[in-house]
Amino acid sequence: MLPLIYAHRGASGLFPENTMEAFHAAVRRRADGIELDVQLSSDNKLVVIHDHQLDRTTTGSGLVRSHTLQELRQYRADKDSHSRFSKARIPTLREVFQAFSETPLRIIIELKNFLVSQPHLEDLVIEQIRRFQLTERTIISSFNFDSLLRIKELDPLQTTGLLYVGPLANPWEVASRYRADQLHVPHDQLTASVIKQSHQHGLTVLGWNLNSSRELQGALKLGVDGAITNYPGRAKKILRSL
Ligand code: G3P
Ligand code: CA
């Protein structure tokens, strides 16, 4: 099977990250899936944004977690006041599911609960996935491995991905301990040996932070199962040329 291309925060190399604009752009570039980040507003709505602070990517400031959904909606999700994306807003997970649940698009949902506590985030995400019958087309990833275990307790059929940055001496043992189905491996740790051993352990391997042509070409040639990239169009083009 050909490696699947996932647009990281949507087609975020060219569009404002984690916005409907970036997700639709990924679909236009024929990405197989999108990756997005989810956290909670102060009124416990599932909102799609990467940073815990609003400041870098929106016209708001302060903690996402201290704002209601209605407050978050007022901010633009592209800070550039001259941008052609002035209508871009922080989406909810529900909005993303509404837009794509009738399409074949796969969705990686990263739980952003490693640094800031997000009570019951796992329960709320599983509930939303079930409401849209998206269990088979979604992957839940997180740097918070306990959270992945909680997901498996809530739904053993939900695919999960162990997401890591720093080298893990034995990622296969860690994946087994936390019942993860996939390893989400940073590009600088992606080797033929890691892929081979993962497959021997029955784990799917997705590489992340694969953005330059060189990184993408290298990973796709190695036989990775999926690539998470800011440039899905570039990745698809490289895949066609191999
Ligand atoms: O899926 C991998 C990637 O999303 C993890 O890093 O910081 O972009 O959320 P980050
Ligand atoms: Ca992410």
Image: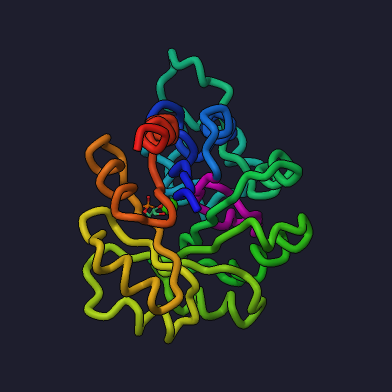
Is residue 41 positioned above or below 114 on the image?
Answer: above
Residue 76 horizontal side relative to residue 51, left or right: right
Instruction: Provide the residue span drawn in magenta.
Output: 33-48
Residue 239 rendering spot, x and y as whole percentages: 39, 38
The answer to which image quadrant residue 162 occupies is bottom left
Q: Residue at the location (37% across, 56% down)?
A: 224
Q: In which quarter of the image is residue 194?
A: bottom left
Is 149 located above or below residue 35 in the figure? below
User: Residue at position x 54%, y 63% from top?
Assistant: 140
**Relative depth, front residue between 151 and 139:** 139
Relative image position of residue 225 (x, y in whole percent): 43, 56
Q: In which quarter of the image is residue 104?
A: top right
Can residue 12 be seen here?
no
Find residue 230 and report its horizontal and vertical position in percent: 39, 38
**42 part of magenta stretch:** yes
Q: Nearer the viewer, residue 21 or 112?
A: 21
> At which x and y percent is residue 217?
28, 41
Does residue 221 appear left or right of residue 66 in this picture? left
Q: Main secondary structure of the magenta part?
A: strand
